[in-house]
Image: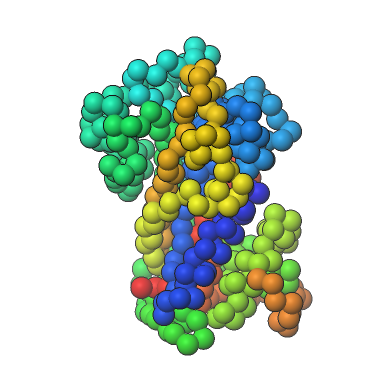
Amino acid sequence: MQFSLNFFKKVFAATQSDVQSKSASENLFFSPMSIYSALLLAYFGANNRTEDQLTEILGLQNMDKVGAVQAYKLVKFTRQLMRVAGLVKYDFDIANRFYFNEDENIRPCIKDIFNEDIEMLNFAFQPAESRTRINQWVEDITRNKIKDLVTSDTINANTRIALVNAAYFKGQWASQFKVANTRLTSFAINNKEEGVANMMFQKGRFRHAAVEELQANLLEMPFLGGDVSFFALLPKGNNGLEETVSRLTLDTLRNAMASTFPLTVDVGIPKFRLEQTLSLRNVLVKMGLTDMFDSLAADFSGFNGVPGLKFDEATHKAFIEVNEEGSEAAAATALVAFRMARPLDGVRFICDHPFMFFIYDNLSESILFMGVYRNPK
């Protein structure tokens, strides 16, 4: 979760400065698990300072590379086993793929360990066909939701390696919204602008907490099966999102999640669909991953035994649709007065102003997807 929050805060800060230069706010959505998985692939082939930087950003200081490979294999096997055994009530798929230029002399140990995740392509003489192959694989994993992940700007005749991750989730609410209750309502984009959201409503028993540390309310809505949940973090006030995010740490989020308790809640959540493409390079460099994109400093000799491999770009695409059935995948010190006493029962949780949300896997204790909803445009 630490990587998820670190990455989220960097991206949020970048979009926030961009938002302030525009009349309208921007929504945000990405999969930290997908990004983490792709970086983990790079870590397996990294050496020296490049490996040190990836170790730091991925939080692997207490695990050597052998242990990381074993954990990678175990997680993959466990997910496959649960799917085959019919133990999951939702559709979640995540897959990794190493694409190497066909003349790369890949080290035997890499081939042995990741055999089924490796594919050789002719980037040098068939870059267009290689792009088509990669994009088709991504479309297959994401049920055609993510298209054209790689383009001629990212995959061309000079490409030697591409590390790709694809993730997909579709879950039904354990307590579904009734379509008849969905209606247009006002949505405060900020204190000056207002939009109209297609708001879904229901009243039910959900885990809820008023979190003073974050100056926000937290609601958990489980998907069918209970292993995965949708969390919404609703700040106090129309302009409270930046304050809430500034207070967000691993400890404050875990404390908030642990403090939820069942209540009868009047829930209102916008029905929305988001698609986003993020260029990750600048964000990752700001997080400390400088060598990966530097032709002189990058060391990925763990893949082929020789120096020279580097990454030019890192691109991420994400999609989410939230509807009645379910989901398909600041430094200010002034404190706002906030009611913390647990109500006996019955609270309102109406997301009619900007809020943060994330889809959380309770089994692995990891954030699969996360984002910010600021504008019902």
Q: Residue furthest bottom?
A: 192
Front residue of this view, candidates 36 and 227: 36
Specify the quadrant of the image occupied by residue 341.
bottom right
Report the label total. 0
For residue 241, side relative to residue 127 (left or right): right
Q: Of all residues shown, which one is farthest toward the right?
A: 341
Eyeballing the image, is 321 above or below 92? below
At which x and y percent is residue 34?
Answer: 49, 43
x 59%, y 59%: residue: 9
| Above or below: residue 1 compared with residue 83 | below
Instruction: Please indicate whether residue 79 sits to the left or right of residue 246 in the image.
Output: left
Farthest front residue? 296
Q: Residue at horizontal 45%, vertical 37%?
A: 311
Residue 211 found in image quarter: bottom right
Q: Nearer the viewer, residue 42 or 72?
A: 42
In front of the other: 366 or 97: 97
Dividing the image into 4 quarters, which one contains the C terminus?
Answer: bottom left
Left or right: where 302 falls relative to 375:
right
Q: Is residue 313 visible?
A: yes
Q: Position of residue 277 (x, y in %)?
A: 39, 54
Q: Please say if 168 is above or below 192.
A: above
> In this orientation, which residue lies closer to the viewer: 333 or 30?
333
Color theme of the render: rainbow
Q: Would residue 216 be seen by someone viewing this image from the given angle?
A: no
Which residue shows up at 63% across the image and 43% down it? 57
The residue lying furthest to the top in this view is 108
Q: Residue at x 43, y 33 (%)?
A: 163
